[in-house]
Image (cartoon, rainbow, N blue to C red):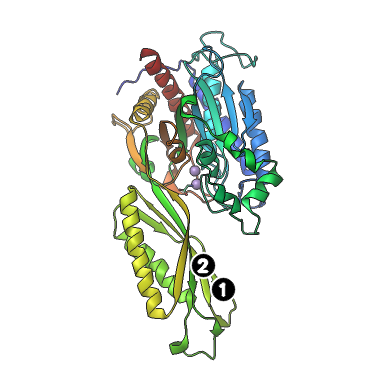
Amino acid sequence: MTTTSLLQISPDAVTAAARRVMERCDELARVTATPRAIERVYLTHEHATANRMAAGWMREVGMSSRQDAAGNQLGRLETTSGPDEPALLLGSHLDTVRNAGRFDGITGVLSAIEVVRLLRAPGGPGGPGSDPFGHEAWHSPLPFALEVVAFWDEEGTRFGKALLGSSAVAGEWNEDWWNLTDSGGTSLRVAAIEFGLDPSRIGEAARRPEELVGYLEAHIEQGPELHRRGEALAVVSSIASARRFQVTVEGEARHAGGTPYDLRRDALLGASEAALAVERICRAEHHIIGTVGQFEAFPGGVNIIPGETRFSIDLRGEFDGERDRVWGELSRELDAIMGRRGLRWRHREIHNAAAVGCAPLLQDVLREGIAGTSGDSVAAGGDEPSVLFSPAGHDAMTLASITDVGMLFLRNPDGVSHHPEEAVSVGDVGRGIRALAESVLQLAADRRAA
Ligand code: HGY
Ligand code: MN
Ligand code: MN
């Protein structure tokens, strides 16, 4: 693996960039709807605050910044080739799950901003004496414009449907989504209007393929693989296909004391057998992962047999066909369980994203980018960086419908994510920033040579 670094920049500048990312992850962690936990969801006060902060950080490195019709925040740096050139998009998401960690998504947005800073720094491709961030008019010498995007609602925390912001950018907005409601009954349409967006203009967020050179996303790995391998960075090969369902089980609410077992139609027990079946059936597969994350029993009285239970199923796979086959098996098993118990069940699919392969060209560019970190990102004695499948979903899945996508994973010790203990080291953030900057320069060199 070549170790030529294209980015002639001091290690101190990279260390300073990594430290800035960690500090700003802490700053953003304080932008939350719940004082003792991190919760920053779509079309809220926290969304608006985080966008203002991101816009300031984008402008600080000389980008113009705008909020698009879906509430995503974008920064842009023109190229010397002139305005309106196709752009390489770097970024990730700023929204979170409930009781979140501080790095999922956020690390990728902030690292992208630092990449722009490094590319503009003296010694970056702007050459000696390049603009020291003083002048808005400074244009990148790269053969494409650079954009940083902070997507919103990658997680689907508020309305259940994930990847809303990136779906709008990919031109895949579904008008039915406006009727989705949050736990308080507020529709996506009302929330958007209250946030200051105009639902009738959502189409203006869409980007055309010819506007883009590609999309690169750095993201913490949400599993323990890099930690186990002793490596800091990995290239992502493909991103899991995911389907999410809301399941309702109907039985009969009756007196907890006076109702003998042979007369019971207990919706909670039926749903509980179903949840165990999700685990049992998925564990028997190799590339399928099923999770029941939400589970509610109604009416919820201590002395009342639950007459209704609602729960979620999050089903993922490396291949759509395998995932769909397992969904068929699960459906048949739920039919059998509910039949035995005299219960009825129904489901509503609230999310369906096909598996996505990362572009081979961008995988190569990221591999070269990791090589440019002078080899301290791969396992000792290793030659090539690892290439990992992502069982976690990402905005890159959506962008793949309009441009080439590539993803870079950063080591996450123990792989804890969607939890306050989520972690990433400042050293690995620095390696990720450097690899991403190297990848941008590698892509530029490839395009110049083409
Ligand atoms: O759920 C996921 O896979 C991602 O973290 N949104
Ligand atoms: Mn997440
Ligand atoms: Mn994420």
> Element at badge 2?
strand
Give the amino acid at mark 1.
Phe
Determine which quarter of the picture holds residue 366: top left
Answer left or right for 51 relative to 6: right
Label 2: which residue?
310
User: Which numbered dot is residue 378?
Assistant: none
User: Which residue corresponds to the image point at 51% horizontal and 50% vertical from the top-left?
Assistant: 418
Residue 30 percent location from the top left of the image: 65, 44
Residue 401 percent location from the top left of the image: 43, 36
Determine which quarter of the picture holds residue 257: bottom right
Please determine whether, in this image, residue 111 is positioned above or below residue 31.
above
**Residue 22 appears in the picture as rendered:** no
Does the CB distance between marks 1 and 2 fall below 8 Å?
yes
User: Which residue corresponds to the image point at 57% horizontal and 41% vertical from the top-left?
Assistant: 152
Please determine whether, in this image, residue 187 is positioned above or below residue 103.
below
Answer left or right for 52 relative to 380: right
User: Which numbered dot is residue 298?
Assistant: 1
- The crowd level at tag 2 (other Cα within 10 Å; few <14, some 14-19, many 20+) is many
N-terminal label among 1 and 2: 1
> Element at badge 1?
strand
Query: Which quarter of the rendered picture does the N terminus lie within?
Result: top left
Answer left or right for 128 relative to 369: right
Q: Is mark 1 within 8 Å of ligand 1?
A: no
User: Which residue corresponds to the image point at 29% horizontal and 31% vertical from the top-left?
Assistant: 382
Residue 61 percent location from the top left of the image: 60, 22
Identify which residue, 300 or 16, lies in the foreground: 300
Give the amino acid at mark 2.
Arg
Answer left or right for 295 relative to 184: left
**Residue 309 appears in the picture as rendered:** yes
